[in-house]
């Protein structure tokens, strides 16, 4: 309805029509959306990665980490295309309990490696990130110097899925990084669970960071982890801690003597260093260089890489088989039914399992 005040004949104050309420959504947003980058093809991804384009490398890693079927198909194509250009890096796994100084050490080791030339990618495997909904490893902010260094690429742990899934994605990311010219790869893992085994199955050298000073250094360390280590390094050997670190070094050396010889023929070494004060970093790295030269000469380097490739093929088959089985809707309901029978002691777990499997194989074969 018109206000009578707006009539030309009205002598009093005129009322303005007012300003229209602006739309809640920015009308330019649509235009911005339209100009968004189109999805690269696998060939385009590969071309950019081979040129060392970090932005496209990051995007490709995101694709690898995605669980969307379309992304997975594209990611596999990119990996396949990059594979012929991969493999020529030195891959080092680094593990240690939280607080042992992994990030401080990786900062120091990383800068040492970069000083010699080349490029470094720091990846991480952190299965706990699924629970905490955030990665505690491989975070850029934890490695202050490396995060601003040229030629360094830091990528947090993939967060989705089981340990096997997370590890496979990191394994695939290694391929992309190598194709992009990264000739040093660090894979960091938190030294508390099974993730060490996963890291061990994708690196050439496995470095275990330890701390001294508790007097019971050998306690709480899983024998299996020590057995996997090609080198044990005792961090924080600085100030008043030096003596304790030396003592721990002797303990570890003695303990290692009790282990069977390693398949590589290499005798694992125990060194002390300080990541924070950058003492002994060169020595740790000389040990790794020495190991690589040793296993390249005796053929173990190539042998281990081949074994690892086989391992990942079988792991992937295991993964796919399992998900095919457990995602089948008929299997889901049959399992539920059998579970009830087993819980009520109507059927034994073994015949129940056999019947479910027989049904499954009857369907697919
Ligand atoms: P992470 O949890 O294994 O990544 O360990 P951080 O690198 O975050 O280190 C844990 C704590 O130990 C931090 O407060 C560091 O400053 C300290 N730290 C790390 N390396 C050294 C070292 O070489 N000497 C000393 N004295 N402290 C260190």
Image: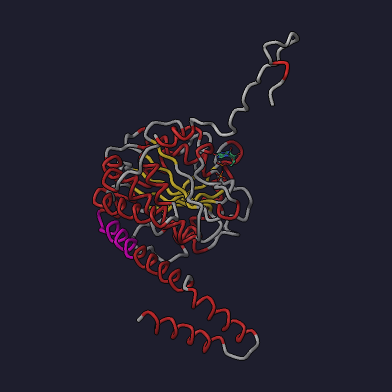
x then y, percent, for residue 62: 42, 47
Residue at the (53%, 56%) spot, across then down? 127
User: Percent from the top left, x then y, of residue 97?
Assistant: 56, 51
Could you tell me which residue is drawn at 62 percent across and 91 percent down?
Answer: 346
Q: Nearer the viewer, residue 284 or 57?
A: 57
149 versus 88 height, above or below? above
Nearer-the-camera pick, 348 or 327: 327
Colour option used: secondary structure
Q: Main secondary structure of the magenta part?
A: helix
> Which residue is at 51% across, 33% downward?
144
The reply, left or right, for residue 253 in relation to residue 19 is: left
Q: Position of residue 307 (x, y in %)?
A: 32, 64
Most extreme residue toward the top is 11
- Does residue 287 appear in the picture of this structure? no
Quadrant including the N terminus: top right
Question: Image point 37% across, 38% down: which residue?
Answer: 37
Any magenta on residue 305?
A: yes
Segment colored magenta: 297-310
Viewer-side residue, 71 vs 346: 71
Give coordinates of residue 18: x percent, y percent. 66, 20
> In the displayed structure, would residue 197 be above or below residue 180?
below
């Amino acid at each position: 309805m018109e206000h009578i005040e707006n009539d030309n004949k009205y002598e009093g104050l005129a009322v303005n029509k007012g300003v229209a309420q602006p739309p809640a959504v920015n009308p330019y947003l649509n235009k911005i959306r339209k100009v968004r980058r189109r999805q690269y093809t696998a060939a385009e991804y590969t071309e950019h990665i081979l040129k060392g384009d970090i932005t496209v490398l990051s995007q490709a890693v995101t694709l690898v980490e995605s669980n969307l079927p379309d992304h997975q198909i594209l990611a596999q194509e990119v990996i396949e295309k990059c594979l012929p250009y991969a493999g020529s890096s030195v891959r080092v796994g680094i593990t240690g309990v939280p607080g042992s100084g992994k990030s401080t050490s990786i900062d120091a080791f990383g800068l040492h490696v970069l000083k010699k030339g080349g490029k470094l990618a720091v990846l991480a495997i952190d299965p706990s990130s699924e629970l905490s909904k955030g990665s505690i490893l491989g975070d850029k902010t934890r490695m202050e110097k490396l995060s601003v260094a040229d030629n360094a690429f830091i990528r947090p742990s993939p967060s989705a899925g089981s340990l096997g899934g997370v590890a496979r994605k990191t394994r695939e990311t290694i391929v992309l990084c190598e194709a992009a010219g990264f000739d040093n790869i660090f894979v960091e893992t938190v030294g508390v669970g099974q993730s060490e085994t996963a890291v061990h199955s994708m690196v050439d050298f496995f470095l275990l960071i330890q701390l001294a000073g508790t007097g019971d250094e050998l306690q709480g360390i899983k024998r299996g982890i020590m057995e996997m280590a090609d080198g044990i390094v005792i961090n924080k050997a600085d100030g008043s801690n030096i003596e304790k670190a030396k003592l721990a070094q002797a303990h570890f050396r003695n303990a290692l003597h009790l282990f069977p010889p390693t398949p590589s023929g290499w005798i694992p070494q125990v060194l002390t260093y300080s990541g924070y004060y950058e003492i002994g970093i060169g020595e740790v790295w000389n040990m790794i260089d020495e190991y690589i030269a040793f296993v390249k000469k005796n053929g173990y380097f190539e042998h281990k890489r081949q074994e690892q490739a086989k391992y990942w093929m079988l792991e992937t088959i295991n993964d796919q088989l399992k998900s095919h089985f457990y995602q089948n809707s008929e299997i889901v309901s049959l399992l539920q039914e059998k579970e009830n029978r087993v819980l009520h002691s109507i059927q034994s777990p073994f015949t129940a399992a056999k019947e479910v499997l027989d049904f499954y194989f009857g369907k697919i074969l």
